[in-house]
Amino acid sequence: MTRILLVEDDKGIVNGLTEFLKGEGFDVKSADGQTGAMKLLEEYGFDLVLLDISLRDGNGFTACSAIKSEYGLPVIFLTASGDEYSTVTGFDLGADDYVPKPFRPRELVSRIKNVLRLTGSGGGVVQMGDVTVDTVKGTASKKGQELYLSALEYRLLLVFLNNRGAVLSRAKLLEAIWDASGEFVNDNTLTVYIKRLRDKIEDDPQNPNVIKTVRGLGYKVDL
């Protein structure tokens, strides 16, 4: 599932656009300013950023520069500033597209898909040790043999893939798979799903080499 960070301080736009994009199959999180956006980027793996120029703190131009230099993600500007200066400045900073407000949601989806295609983001085949994940088909395999993962197991695997190198707390993992399933997932259930996932992807589940336990902090994937 393509993960989008929406950086916008207009709550009406955030609520409406988030609902629409989720209905189109995107996973969306939002921030109203540069500080919140950078915090989310540290915590989650995103495929694309939708960025307004006028923010609660900071501004879209400085945020775009930081996002590009630190994360290299594709950025689409969403703004009422349709003047030539804003457009040129945005592209000079590395923006991948520029959509003036008001915009038609379906046109925006088309622009998002086009940018993802051109930048090679938002899906494809990802390798994690011996495990291969096809995020377009929604399948996973190990050494050529398909792994039959449940929806929550697959979602959990994607969370680890999108956060490789970061330590994920149990609270963070619970939040991620609860959002995906739409059902309450408790701490005991998380333990069960991590065990099931390890049973399928690890050579030795008792001594995991892929999903490692960081004692007192959570879990981490380095591969």
Image (tube, helix red, strand yellow):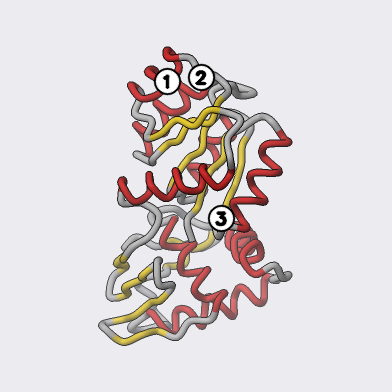
Name which quarter of the figure residue 54 lies in. top right
Label 3 crowd (10 A; few <14 / some 14-19 / many >=20): some
Q: In this image, 216 relative to 113: left or right?
A: right
Q: CA distance from mark 1 to mark 3?
A: 27 Å
**Where, quadrant-wise, is the C terminus in this rendering?**
bottom left
**Residue 150 shows which numbered tag?**
none
Secondary structure at badge 1 equals helix
Q: Earlier in the sequence, mark 2 or mark 1?
A: 2
Q: Which residue is mark 3?
A: 27
Question: Answer yes or no: do the residues labelled 2 and 3 have beta carbons within 8 Å?
Answer: no
Residues under labels 2 and 3: Cα distance? Answer: 28 Å
User: Could you classify mark 1 by the number of other residues whose Cα lies within 10 Å: few (under 14), some (14-19), or many (20 or more)?
Assistant: some
Choose mark 1 or mark 3, whichever is in front.
1
* Foreground label between 2 and 3: 2
The local crowd at label 2, few if under 14, some if 14 to 19, many if 20 or more residues have their Cα within 10 Å, is: few
**Residue nearest the viewer, comparing 128 with 3:** 3
Relative image position of residue 220 (x, y in whole percent):
44, 61
Residue contact at pointers 2 and 1, CB within 8 angstroms = yes
Is the residue 157 above or below the residue 217 in the image? below
Query: Which callout, 2 or 3, points at the residue further toward the start of the chain?
Result: 3
Tell me if 35 is positioned left or right of 138 in this view: right
Residue to which mark 1 is pinned: 87
Q: Which residue is mark 2?
A: 82
Q: CA distance from mark 2 to mark 1?
A: 7 Å
Tag 2 secondary structure: loop
The amino acid type of the residue labelled 2 equals Gly
**Label 1 close to label 3 by CB (< 8 Å):** no
Residue 170 occupies quadrant: bottom right
- For the point 72% across and 35% down, the residue is 11
Q: Position of residue 77 (x, y in %)?
A: 48, 31
127 displayed left or right of 60: left
